[in-house]
């Protein structure tokens, strides 16, 4: 087993478990404000201290994990769900007009700085978690479409695909039955990386006020609200910041580890 | 390469000159908002007055630091017995910054322009009762009113009523020409406005030679700028949580002044369920003001029970009418047929009183069964959809104009009150000049809007100024939106 994979999976698991746990239990109710107890440093009653409204930061980080993970997961889902079929069709119709159309469309989306367009989308359709998901999801489509097409193109020339064609299978069936299983590894690795980018993007959008709206907690907004408090209560900014850092690090390590494990060629080179 | 030493020497020389000037006779102050243009007589933004009121532009009368109305460009005035004729005696020897003389013609031009049909003055109501303006001689102006207006001298002190010249009016938006103790020098948009002392000022010259206004909207950047001493003073410091640090720092003086800013939770009086007074009363009893002042403003602010400044002599303390009583709130909701509560929107503009206050209010409303869905808005968006478009259930905003209870008489104003009985009180008030009678009417008006629970009156906004020790002559309070630097100096 590779070390990156272990560390990465462990870090990711901690946050996923925290998010799942927050559905049934958090140390304190985060919708009740307790202003007299605000800005308490980390300690006995509040392990990670309290924020400017006296809310328990541990509970906020746990519930915030839910928001981050949900937004990133659905956004990656959109990207994969639309990008992979597009990439598969482009590869199946390689060289044709539709291939051109799909890939140039992808180039068009790629050409825009993703976060700027995400801000535009949320500014036009209103801030909120759902619009953040759509905004982040749209930019995952070309990532998966390109990767799928590139990988699939290489496979189309291989003998086993030729055999399938000779056997009379349609391009669609070949894509689903032969190409897709062979590129699934790549998709999983890329999905992990995109997932971490999705968490970062959600935090960024929330930081500028376009992500999840209060009272739904979000790591990005917690950071933004802690900004003026850094000099008097650094822990308020520290913990949501650490949560973002560790989750993104964990997912990236996990992606690296998965790639090393799933791609035999790389394993040889590194060894 | 050879020019480098010379260039360095020049640079050093320039830096030395600048720092020597700032140390003794110049000042750099910061405020949060940059004005969109520099003509206070045609722009609505309070930020225009912040920079230019008294510094560059002056009116017939003016607000002193304590909020009283004192002579400005008019040295004195006579009022006819029926209260309809105001004869203003102008000061002799007043010139505009472009060296043209300020005389009665300029006053007539300014007032006629402000009240004209095509006027874009943001406070046209100030001039509504003027019937005619006549030039008697170059230093005397007679203003005839169509009805007695008790607040006329007060109205003339507003930033929207300053005297401008026909020669320079076209350029005022970018190059303001007034009569004040400072002349406009330069505007670097997005960063700063520079003023220099007017050597030909008619009154006591300003002690400072130069004054630079910088615009720092972000609270974190504001904190950094003051801490690093990039600015000598910050007027209206935006992060109340940082104030104790400045108070503990021997380099700074902190002045917490009062403002004319009534911060309210406004309700859309024309839309259900807020068209029912019981629902509005229920909302009022659900709100714990002190928790908002502590939680959002870190203790800065005075609770109010009506739309009136508590430091004003005519203020009535009506906070008891809307005391924090969640049980009563629930009972009122039940009476209104909303025992299970309801869902509404809560639109929040950027200042922390709104953003933080909004989260606290949403939590307090949730406790009585009302779900307030928060939407954070930028100012432009808030003005367009909430203020003009009236697309809101609840919103939080601070009304910073002085004596602005009259906004309740306008049925089209965003919270849409305008009860005829209230309009009648306002009309009577405008026709009354006797102080005791005015106070009586103002108190009736305050009581009516409090008993009708038009809005939830939260608190009077505090105005924190953080300045370097040694600066004297700063305004403590904000009787109008202004940073008057004409009396500021580096005292010893």
Image (tube, coloured by chain):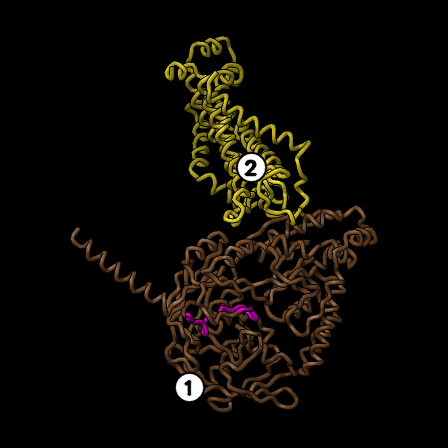
Chain colours: A yellow, B brown
Please check the rendered image and state whether residue B479 is part of the magenta-colored stretch, yes or no. yes
Helix, strand or loop at mark 1 = loop
Name the spot of residue B152 as percent of width and height, x first.
Answer: 60, 80
Q: Which residues are magenta?
A: B476-492
Q: Main secondary structure of the magenta part?
A: loop
How many numbered badges does the structure rendering display? 2
The answer to whether residue B274 is seen in the rendering is no
Query: Which residue is labeled 2 in the image?
Result: A134
Chain of the residue that carries numbered disc 2 in the rendered image: A
Helix, strand or loop at mark 2 = helix
Same-subunit check for callouts 1 and 2: no
Query: Which residue is labeled 1 in the image?
Result: B93
Chain of the residue that carries numbered disc 1 in the rendered image: B
Label 2 crowd bin: few (<14), some (14–19), many (20+), radius 10 Å: some
Label 1 crowd bin: few (<14), some (14–19), many (20+), radius 10 Å: few
Name the spot of residue A69 as percent of width and height, x first.
Answer: 57, 32
| Image quadrant in which you'd find residue B470 | bottom left
User: Considering depth in this image, is A43 or B42 the residue closer to the camera?
Assistant: A43
Name the spot of residue A230 as percent of width and height, x first.
Answer: 51, 47
């Amino acid at each position: 087993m590779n070390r990156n994979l272990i560390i990465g999976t462990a870090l990711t698991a901690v946050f996923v478990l925290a998010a799942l746990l927050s559905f049934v239990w958090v140390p304190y109710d985060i919708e009740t404000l307790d202003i007299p107890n605000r800005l308490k440093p980390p300690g006995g009653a509040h392990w990670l201290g309290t924020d400017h409204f006296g809310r328990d930061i541990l509970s906020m980080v746990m519930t915030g994990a839910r928001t981050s993970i949900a937004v990133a997961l659905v956004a990656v889902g959109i990207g994969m769900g639309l990008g992979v079929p597009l990439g598969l069709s482009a590869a199946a119709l390689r060289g044709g007009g539709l291939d051109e159309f799909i890939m140039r469309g992808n180039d068009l989306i790629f050409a825009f700085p993703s976060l700027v367009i995400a801000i535009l989308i949320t500014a036009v359709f209103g801030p909120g978690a759902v619009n953040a998901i759509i905004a982040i999801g749209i930019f995952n489509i070309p990532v998966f479409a390109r990767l799928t097409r590139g990988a699939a193109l290489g496979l189309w020339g291989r003998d086993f695909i030729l055999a399938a064609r000779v056997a009379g299978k349609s391009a669609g069936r070949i894509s689903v039955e032969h190409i897709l299983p062979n590129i699934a590894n790549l998709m999983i690795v890329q999905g992990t990386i995109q997932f971490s980018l999705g968490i970062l993007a959600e935090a960024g959008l929330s930081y500028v006020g376009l992500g999840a709206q209060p009272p739904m907690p979000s790591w990005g907004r917690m950071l933004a609200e802690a900004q003026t408090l850094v000099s008097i209560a650094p822990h308020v900014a520290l913990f949501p910041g650490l949560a973002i850092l560790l989750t993104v690090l964990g997912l990236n390590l996990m992606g690296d580890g998965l790639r090393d494990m799933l791609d035999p060629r790389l394993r040889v080179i590194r060894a | 390469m050879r020019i480098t030493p010379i260039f360095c020497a020049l640079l050093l020389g320039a830096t030395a000159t600048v720092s020597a000037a700032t140390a003794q006779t110049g000042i750099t102050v910061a405020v949060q908002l940059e004005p969109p243009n520099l003509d206070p007589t045609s722009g609505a933004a309070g930020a225009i007055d912040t920079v230019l009121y008294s510094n560059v532009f002056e009116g017939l009368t003016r607000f002193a630091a304590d909020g009283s109305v004192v002579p400005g460009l008019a040295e004195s005035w006579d009022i006819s017995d029926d209260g309809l004729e105001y004869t203003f005696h102008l000061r002799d020897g007043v010139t505009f910054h472009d060296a043209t003389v300020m005389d009665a013609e300029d006053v007539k031009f300014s007032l006629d322009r402000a009240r004209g049909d095509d006027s874009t003055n943001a406070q046209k109501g100030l001039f509504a009762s003027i019937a005619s303006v006549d030039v008697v001689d170059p230093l005397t102006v007679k203003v005839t009113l169509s009805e007695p207006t008790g607040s006329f001298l007060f109205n003339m002190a507003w930033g929207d009523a300053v005297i401008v010249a026909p020669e320079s009016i076209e350029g005022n938006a970018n190059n303001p020409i007034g009569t004040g103790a400072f002349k406009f020098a330069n505007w670097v948009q997005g960063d700063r406005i520079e003023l220099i002392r007017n050597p030909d000022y008619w009154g006591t010259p300003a002690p400072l030679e130069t004054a630079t206004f910088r615009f720092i909207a972000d609270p974190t950047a504001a904190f950094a700028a003051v801490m690093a001493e990039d600015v000598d003073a910050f007027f209206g410091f935006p992060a109340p949580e940082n104030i104790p640090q400045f108070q503990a720092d021997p380099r700074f003086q902190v002045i917490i002044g009062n403002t004319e800013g009534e911060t309210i939770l406004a309700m859309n009086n024309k839309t259900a369920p807020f068209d029912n007074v019981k629902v509005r009363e229920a909302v009022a009893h659900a709100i714990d003001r002190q928790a908002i002042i502590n939680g959002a403003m870190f203790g800065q602010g005075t609770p109010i029970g009506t739309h009136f400044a508590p430091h004003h002599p005519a203020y009535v303390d009506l906070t008891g009418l809307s005391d924090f009583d969640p049980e009563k709130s629930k009972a009122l909701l039940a009476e209104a047929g909303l025992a299970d509560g309801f869902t509404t929107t809560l639109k929040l503009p950027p200042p922390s009183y709104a953003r933080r206050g909004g989260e606290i209010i949403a939590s307090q409303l949730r406790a009585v069964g009302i779900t307030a869905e928060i939407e954070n808005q930028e100012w432009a968006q808030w003005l367009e959809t909430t203020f003009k478009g009236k697309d809101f259930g609840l919103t939080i905003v601070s009304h910073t104009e002085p004596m602005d209870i009259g906004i309740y008489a306008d049925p089209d104003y965003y919270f849409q009150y305008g009860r005829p009985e209230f309009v009648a009180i306002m009309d009577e008030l405008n026709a009354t000049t006797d102080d005791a009678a005015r106070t009586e009417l103002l108190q009736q008006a305050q009581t009516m809007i409090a008993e009708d629970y038009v809005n939830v009156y939260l608190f009077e906004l505090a105005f924190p100024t953080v300045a370097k020790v040694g600066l004297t002559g700063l305004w403590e309070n904000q009787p109008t939106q202004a940073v008057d630097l004409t009396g500021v100096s580096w005292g010893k």
